[in-house]
Image: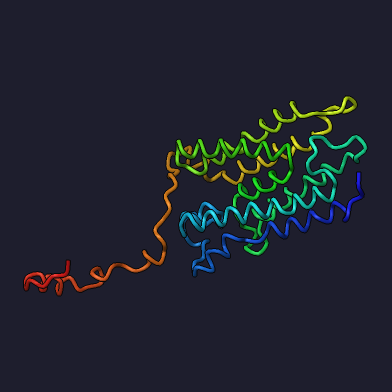
Amino acid sequence: MPPELVPAWVLIPVAFLLGSIPFGFLIARAKGVDIRKHGSRNVGATNVGRVLGKKFGRLCFVLDAGKGLLPTVLAGLNAGLLGRWMPPPEAPSSLLALWLAVPLAAVLGHVFCPWLGFRGGKGVATSAGGLLGVFPVMTLAVLVAGLVWLAVFKLKRVVSIASLAAAGVVPLATASIISLAPASASQNRWLATAPLLVLSLGLAAFVVYTHRENIARLRAGNEHAFRPAEPLAATAAPPPDARENPREMARDTRAGTGRA
């Protein structure tokens, strides 16, 4: 294996800082909106899409996913593990674990954003981006989870249900892919890839934790389907007629000059 360009642990705090960039907050602020005071008051892509429209929600999702993807790919290249189904037998047992700590750090930075009082998003997009960067095993698992998300959302139109379903699929897909992945005769595939399973289970459990309020609303039967709101600029002020004096409007109507 080629030597690491930088020690693997150095990239963990870098990933946390990158993950902590609150893109949802910044996008909304650029539009003159404090996203923390609208919708669900969350700075994630779903609430950005709900408050500002689908275009901005999709932009936020891509940027949040990129926060997890970029440092993970760089860390994988640095460790010489990117593109391998199994860690090489000569690799230190801690190398894979250190690589996988990078996407985890990015997710923690996103959820516990230090620039917003340690209150960030729910970690779905950043988790997806981080796992996509663990090529190829976790990449395939996330693609399967993405198909599940789309199918459940199309059926239910509730983002939280789709996100929870996708999170639950990731560990199952990861285990299935590992069972089929090529491995050398000298390797125990499950022992060699144990950090992958731990990460997939840990992030799935963490997504469930960040959706605990959604789960409570689902159990109470008052979790709403996703409906993008009208742009705030269009709904901030009432229509002109609503500001008219009712007596004046009635007088105009009687005179045959009422406004349509």
Colouring mode (rainbow / by chain / secondary structure / one colour): rainbow
Q: Which residue appears farthest toward the top when viewing the image?
A: 185
- Percent across and percent down for residue 208 are 60, 41
Residue at left offset 39%, top offset 58%:
230
Give the quadrant of the N terminus.
top right
Residue at left offset 52%, top offset 39%:
150
The residue lying toward the viewer, choosing from 120 and 200, is: 200
- Percent across and percent down for residue 125 are 61, 49
Residue at left offset 66%, top offset 48%:
129
Examine the rendered structure and indicate whether residue 28 appears above or below residue 156: below
The residue lying toward the viewer, choosing from 233 and 216, is: 233
- Percent across and percent down for residue 157 are 45, 41
Residue at left offset 84%, top offset 51%:
78
The quadrant holding residue 163 is top right
Q: Is 36 situated left or right of 144 in this image?
A: left
Examine the rendered structure and indicate whether residue 21 appears above or below residue 86: below
Q: Which residue appears farthest toward the left when viewing the image?
A: 255
Examine the rendered structure and indicate whether residue 194 appears above or below residue 238: above
The quadrant holding residue 206 is top right
Q: Is 250 situated left or right of 12 in this image?
A: left
- Percent across and percent down for residue 174 are 70, 33
Give the quadrant of the C terminus.
bottom left
Number of labels in the image equals: 0
The residue lying toward the viewer, choosing from 147 and 108, is: 147
The quadrant holding residue 209 is top right
